[in-house]
């Protein structure tokens, strides 16, 4: 914006600013009422023992103390981060592989891009139902394929040992294409010169990948990681459809636990403390990754 | 860049094929199962060849109010998409015209909270106001999903409009409102298509808010399908029909509007 000419009074500046306020007012008002105010109320609730229609007592930090001593909170943390790291790692590696594959831009790569969009557009609820039947221990086709290649049938979602890996695999099936789209955008924006220089120097394919593509792609990789992190740390839908946190608490993430505490057991105060903890974690990791991205730009 | 050799081309195509199968086969299995006779769905070893029937769909729409659920989903997704546009377009114009970014940042941070966090107070407030289970509460809450995305997308589309064009309008005596109506909105129309496609799909697919806030009259397809699973299913054919009915509209939109959808999905990444 060009600087205002000197001599413009404060009042004119204010009137120039006025339409701005009018224009953002509806969205701002909506955001305050629907999100800012509820967040404050959840902070307030988290200091109370609050059971709907039963009681509401101020208890200070008791909910947070209870949380730190709660084994399901800690197992929820473990499950949340296991799911997060497993899924993110798989999605970045496979996503990068697919982006490079599509970047070759052969005839037919557009068709593959259309194919890649389909899991992204599907509702997680339908994806969960779909994998319930695919992975069914008694009649699921995945087990049939396992038997065909001489392996044992597996319980998958019903197995306390495998349930987290299985859920990570389902999320990877659905959201790797998202990572691919972002990385493909990054690849298409890369400069040509380093590759031409590498060609002259006789660099091998592997060298070009590790020394040029990967470092230059770092900002896109971190962007994809941020967007996936926000979703993965709050992973809910697919779990709630397929296992509801089970067997036992083997797939009870922090989000699932907080939800059940609030809406199955109606302990709104304790649920508020859990939800706030989860929100702070999401924000912290996002800011951390954002800081990393800034350093690379 | 150098031209790839024949061997390389062949291996790339084989990889294209394998990837496509891994992505499409699960969804194809779901759709195929929805057309199988009941007994054929759970038979082991699984079968690929069967006589297709629409019996599962007939049962689904006869025994359950599935037309009603579909209508509810349409109202909620359509309503929140439209309301999101209505709120976001003026705000996006302001953000772009005055070159500030804090409103988008605030809107995006608000989106990072887990949905369940908002649900705790919403549930209590809507119950107190007698709005629990109403379309109003569902459209309002789903707009929390749609509005920030629309704001982000529209702001970047408005950024693309040449400033001189709008300043000309001002010289010709247009008010700011006139500039928005006569210049910004017509030229930003592609942005409206992009955000409509993306937010309609996101809102249609969103599950958590309606899980708590909907009642029989307003239950959308997502929650109906979930209840169905929760009841301890034995009718897998009908279940797969339910999943297909739920998944088909967003899949169709994605297929028909893929150019726009890709734009919308990668926007946050480019701008972010």
Image (tube, grey):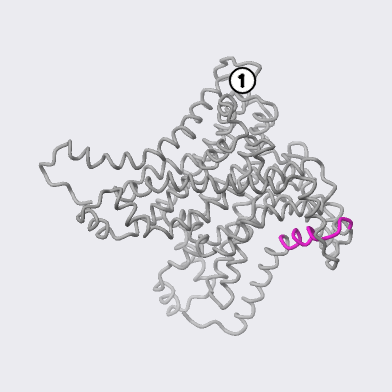
Which residue occupies 46% across, 55% down? B269
Chain at tag 1: A
Q: How many marks?
A: 1
Location of residue B161 (image quadrant): bottom left
Q: Is residue A200 left or right of residue B53?
A: left
Which residue occupies 47% across, 49% down? B149
Which residue occupies 52% across, 23% down? A44
Provide residue B233's location: percent of width, then percent of height.
82, 45
- Which sits in the foreground, B87 or A265? B87
Q: Is residue B58 left or right of residue A239?
A: right
Which residue occupies 64% across, 39% down? B218
Q: Secondary structure at mark 1?
A: strand
Q: Crowding near pointer 1: few (<14 within 10 Å), some, many (20+)?
A: many
Per the image, is A216 magenta?
Answer: no
Q: Look at the picture and state if B14 lies above or below A37.
A: below
Q: Look at the picture and state if B120 lies above or below A162.
A: above
Provide residue A88's location: percent of width, then percent of height.
59, 52
Provide residue A230's location: percent of width, then percent of height.
54, 45
Q: Residue furthest left?
A: A7
- Which sits in the foreground, B18 or A22? A22
Q: Decide whether the magenta segment is chiefly helix, strand or loop.
A: helix
* Part of the protein shown in magenta: B27-39
State the residue position of label 1: A50
Q: Look at the picture and state if B132 lies above or below B16.
A: above
Location of residue A262 (image quadrant): top right
Provide residue B112's location: percent of width, then percent of height.
51, 41
Q: Residue furthest bottom?
A: B6
Q: Is residue B191 left or right of residue B243?
A: left
């Amino acid at each position: 914006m060009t600087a205002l000419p000197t001599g413009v009074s404060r009042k004119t500046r204010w009137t120039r600013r006025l339409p701005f306020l009018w224009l953002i007012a509806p969205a701002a008002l909506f955001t305050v009422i629907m999100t800012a105010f509820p967040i404050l109320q959840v902070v307030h609730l988290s200091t109370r023992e609050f059971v709907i229609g039963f009681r509401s007592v101020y208890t200070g930090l008791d909910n947070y103390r209870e949380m730190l001593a709660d084994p399901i909170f800690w197992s929820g943390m473990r499950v949340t981060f296991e799911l997060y790291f497993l899924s993110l790692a798989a999605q970045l590696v496979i996503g990068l592989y697919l982006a490079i594959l599509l970047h070759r831009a052969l005839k037919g790569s557009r068709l593959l891009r259309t194919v890649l969009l389909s899991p992204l557009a599907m509702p997680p609820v339908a994806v969960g139902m779909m994998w319930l039947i695919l992975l069914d221990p008694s009649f699921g086709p995945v087990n049939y394929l396992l038997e065909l290649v001489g392996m044992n049938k597996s319980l998958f979602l019903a197995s306390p040992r495998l349930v987290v890996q299985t859920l990570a695999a389902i999320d990877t099936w659905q959201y790797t294409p998202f990572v691919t789209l972002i990385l493909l955008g990054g690849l298409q924006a890369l400069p040509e010169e380093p590759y031409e220089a590498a060609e002259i120097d006789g660099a091998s394919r592997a060298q070009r990948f590790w020394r040029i593509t990967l470092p230059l792609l770092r900002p896109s990789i971190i962007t994809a990681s941020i967007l996936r992190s926000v979703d993965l740390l709050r992973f809910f839908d697919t779990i709630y459809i397929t296992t509801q946190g089970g067997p036992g608490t083997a797939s009870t993430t922090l989000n699932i636990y907080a939800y059940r505490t609030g809406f199955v057991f109606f302990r709104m105060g304790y649920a508020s403390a859990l939800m706030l903890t989860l929100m702070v974690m999401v924000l912290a990791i996002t800011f951390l990754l954002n800081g990393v991205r800034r350093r690379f730009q | 860049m150098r031209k790839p050799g024949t061997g390389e081309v062949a291996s790339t195509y084989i990889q294209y094929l394998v990837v496509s199968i891994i992505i499409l086969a699960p969804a194809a299995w779901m759709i195929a199962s929805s057309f199988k006779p009941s007994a054929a769905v759970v038979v082991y070893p699984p079968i690929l060849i069967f006589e297709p029937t629409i019996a599962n769909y007939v049962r689904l729409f006869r025994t359950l109010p599935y037309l009603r659920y579909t209508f509810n989903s349409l109202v909620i997704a359509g309503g929140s998409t439209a309301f999101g546009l209505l709120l976001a377009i003026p705000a996006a114009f302001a953000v772009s015209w005055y070159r500030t970014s804090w409103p988008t940042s605030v809107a995006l941070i608000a989106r990072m909270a887990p949905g369940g966090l908002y649900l705790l107070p919403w549930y209590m407030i809507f119950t107190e106001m007698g709005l629990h289970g109403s379309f109003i509460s569902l459209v309002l809450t789903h707009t929390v999903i749609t509005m920030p995305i629309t704001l982000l997308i529209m702001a970047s589309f408005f950024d693309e409009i040449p400033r001189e064009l709008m300043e000309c309008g001002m010289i010709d005596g247009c008010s700011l409102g006139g500039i928005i109506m006569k210049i910004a909105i017509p030229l930003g129309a592609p942005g409206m298509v992009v955000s409509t496609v993306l937010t309609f799909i996101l809102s249609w697919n969103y599950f958590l808010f309606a899980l708590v806030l909907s009642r029989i009259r307003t239950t959308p397809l997502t929650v109906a399908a979930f209840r169905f699973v929760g009841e301890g299913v034995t009718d897998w054919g009908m279940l797969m029909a339910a999943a297909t009915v739920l998944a088909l509209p967003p899949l169709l939109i994605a297929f028909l509007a893929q150019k726009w959808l890709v734009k919308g999905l990668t926007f946050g990444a480019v701008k972010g």
